[in-house]
C-alpha cells in the first residue's frame, strides 16, 4: 500500500563524505584532477509499511568537469520487485507496467527506471533542496553551491529494515550522453544532518554510495575541440589540424556539417541536442579556441583567447577552460572571465581554470553571430623563465568543458620575435 504520509525531507548534511579514490580504469585517470569523481548517495530517511523513503543526491567532486543542459539522467535495476510510490524533485521517464496493482497506482513500476531532474519553476510542493535545475550540476571549483542535485523517492514492495533492504544494482549515469562508469553500491556510515538552528544532529537510517568516474573515450568517439595559435608580430597562423574532430565530406546537413552561407542554417530554436551539427570546416570541431599573443610589453605580455561555438545544436551553459602554461606563476589579471589556479599533483602553479561571468558571458551561444566569447590574460615577465622562442608563449594543453582539445604540431607554431 502507499504510505499515508510523504513529506519532503529538507535536511542539510552536516558533512559530506568527500573521500575519493583513483579510478580502476587507466583511461579514466585525469592527471589534473586525479581524485575527481561523481558520488551518488542514497540516504534512507524513514521506513514505511512496505518500504522506505530515501533522498538520492548526486555530488560532483570534480574540479572542472560539470554537467550541462539537457542535464543528467540516473538509472538502475531493482534487486527484487520494488516500485516507486511517489517522487519529489525528480521523475521517472516511464511509468512501466503497473497492472498488478489495484486502487492506488505507483508512480513507476519499471524494473530498470531512469530518473531525470525537474525543471526550474517547478511548484514548491514538488521540490526538495538541490533539485529542479534541469539536471545541470556545476563543477566543484566553478560553483560549489550548485555542485549537487537531489531528489526524493518513496520505494514500495521493498525491505523495511537495514537487514531486509536490497540495494539497487547496475547504476548508470548519463550527462546527458555516456562517459561515466559507475561502480557497485557500497554501504557506508549513515549520513549525519544538522538542523537549521545548528543545535541538533540527526542521521539517516541507512546510507549507500556509488562512485562514477569519467572517461573521454566513452564520452566521445572523436575530440570535441581544437586550438589555433597566432601572434601579433607574425602573419603565420597555426590553424586547428585538419580532421581534428572529423573529416569533412561535403556541405550538406545530411552528411554532418552546414555551410554557414547556406539558406538552410538551423535557427536558434534547435539547441541542447546531444548529437552535434557543426559548421563545415577543415577541422570539423564543435568548438574552436584561438590563443593569440596580443602584445609584448617590457615587463608584461598579454594574450587574447577567443572561444568560437561551431555547433548549431548546443548552447554551452557554464562553459569553462583549463589552460596549462608555465607562466601562470606570474599571472596578473584576467578580463572577461573568472580565474582560479587549479591544484593538482604538480608542485608548480602552471594550470588555471577560466569560466564565464554570470549573466554576462557564462553561456557560449550556438554557432552563429553570437557564438563567441572573448577574454584576455595579462602575465608579468620573469627574466629567469620568460622567452619568446620555441613556442614558449603558447599553451601546453587546453581543455574545454573537461575535454582535451587538439593542439597544432609544435613545428607549426608561429615564430615570435
Image: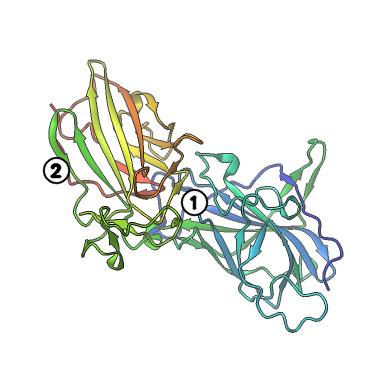
Residue drawn at 87 percent across, 65 percent down? 4
85 sits to left or right of 287: right
Give the labeled residue for mark 2: 412
At which x and y percent is residue 78?
A: 65, 73
Near mark 2 (Cα within 10 A), the count class, few <14, some 14-19 or many ≥20, is some
Above or below residue 28? Residue 377 is: above
Q: Quadrant of the N terminus?
A: bottom right
Examine the rendered structure and indicate whether residue 141 appears above or below residue 74: above
Callout 1 secondary element? loop
**Residue 336 image point, x, y percent:** 40, 30
In terms of image quadrants, where is residue 119? bottom right
| Residue lying furthest right | 4
Taking the spot 41% from the left edge, 58% from the top edge, the residue there is 215
Q: Does label 1 or label 2 sit earlier along the sequence?
A: 1
Badge nearest the viewer, 1 or 2:
1
Q: Residues within 10 Å of mark 1 (few under 14, many from 20)?
A: many
Q: Residue furthest front?
A: 263
Residue 143 visible in the snapshot:
yes
- Determine which quarter of the picture holds residue 256: bottom left
Residue 68: image tag? 1
Total marks shown come to 2
Task: From the top left corner, tell me how far across and down residue 329 is, in percent.
Answer: 35, 26
Cα distance, mark 1 to mark 2?
34 Å
> Which mark, residue 207?
none
Task: Give the structural element (helix, strand or loop) at label 2.
Answer: helix
Locate residue 402, reporting x and y percent.
Answer: 41, 48
Asked whether, in this view, residue 239 is left or right of residue 219, the answer is left
Amino acid at each position: 500500500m502507499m504510505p499515508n504520509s510523504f513529506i519532503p525531507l529538507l535536511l542539510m548534511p552536516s558533512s559530506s563524505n568527500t573521500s575519493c579514490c583513483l579510478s580502476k580504469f587507466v583511461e579514466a585517470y585525469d592527471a589534473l584532477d586525479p581524485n575527481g569523481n561523481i558520488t551518488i548517495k542514497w540516504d534512507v530517511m524513514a521506513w514505511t509499511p512496505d518500504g522506505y523513503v530515501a533522498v538520492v543526491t548526486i555530488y560532483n567532486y570534480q574540479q572542472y568537469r560539470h554537467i550541462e543542459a539537457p542535464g543528467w539522467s540516473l538509472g538502475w535495476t531493482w534487486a527484487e520487485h520494488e516500485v516507486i510510490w511517489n517522487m519529489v524533485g525528480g521523475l521517472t521517464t516511464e511509468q512501466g507496467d503497473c497492472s498488478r496493482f489495484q486502487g492506488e497506482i505507483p508512480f513507476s513500476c519499471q524494473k530498470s527506471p531512469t530518473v531525470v531532474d525537474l525543471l526550474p519553476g517547478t511548484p514548491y510542493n514538488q521540490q526538495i533542496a538541490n533539485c529542479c535545475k534541469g539536471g545541470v550540476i556545476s563543477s566543484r571549483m566553478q560553483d560549489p553551491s550548485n555542485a549537487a542535485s537531489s531528489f526524493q523517492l518513496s520505494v514500495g514492495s521493498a525491505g523495511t529494515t537495514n537487514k531486509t533492504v536490497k540495494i539497487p544494482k547496475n547504476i548508470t549515469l548519463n550527462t546527458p550522453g555516456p562517459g561515466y562508469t559507475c561502480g557497485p553500491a557500497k554501504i557506508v556510515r549513515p549520513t549525519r544532518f544538522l538542523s537549521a538552528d545548528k543545535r541538533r544532529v540527526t542521521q539517516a537510517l541507512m546510507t549507500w554510495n556509488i562512485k562514477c568516474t569519467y572517461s573521454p573515450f566513452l564520452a566521445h568517439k572523436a575530440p570535441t575541440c581544437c586550438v589555433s595559435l597566432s601572434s601579433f608580430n607574425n602573419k603565420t597562423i597555426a590553424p586547428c589540424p585538419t580532421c581534428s574532430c572529423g573529416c569533412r565530406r561535403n556541405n550538406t546537413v545530411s552528411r554532418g556539417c552546414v555551410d554557414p552561407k547556406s539558406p538552410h542554417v538551423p535557427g536558434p530554436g534547435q539547441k541542447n541536442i546531444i548529437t552535434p551539427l557543426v559548421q563545415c570546416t577543415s577541422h570539423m570541431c564543435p568548438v574552436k579556441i584561438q590563443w593569440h599573443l596580443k602584445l609584448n610589453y617590457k615587463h608584461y605580455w598579454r594574450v587574447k583567447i577567443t572561444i568560437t561555438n561551431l555547433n548549431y545544436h548546443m548552447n554551452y551553459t557554464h562553459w569553462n577552460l583549463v589552460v596549462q602554461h608555465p607562466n601562470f606563476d606570474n599571472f596578473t589579471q584576467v578580463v572577461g572571465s573568472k580565474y582560479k589556479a587549479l591544484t593538482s599533483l604538480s608542485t608548480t602553479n602552471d594550470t588555471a581554470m577560466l569560466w564565464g561571468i554570470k549573466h554576462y558571458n557564462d553561456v557560449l551561444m550556438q554557432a552563429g553571430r553570437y557564438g563567441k566569447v572573448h577574454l584576455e590574460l595579462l602575465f608579468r615577465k620573469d627574466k629567469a623563465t620568460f622567452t619568446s622562442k620555441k613556442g614558449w608563449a603558447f599553451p601546453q594543453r587546453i581543455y574545454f568543458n573537461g575535454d582535451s582539445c587538439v593542439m597544432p604540431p609544435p613545428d607549426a607554431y608561429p615564430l615570435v620575435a
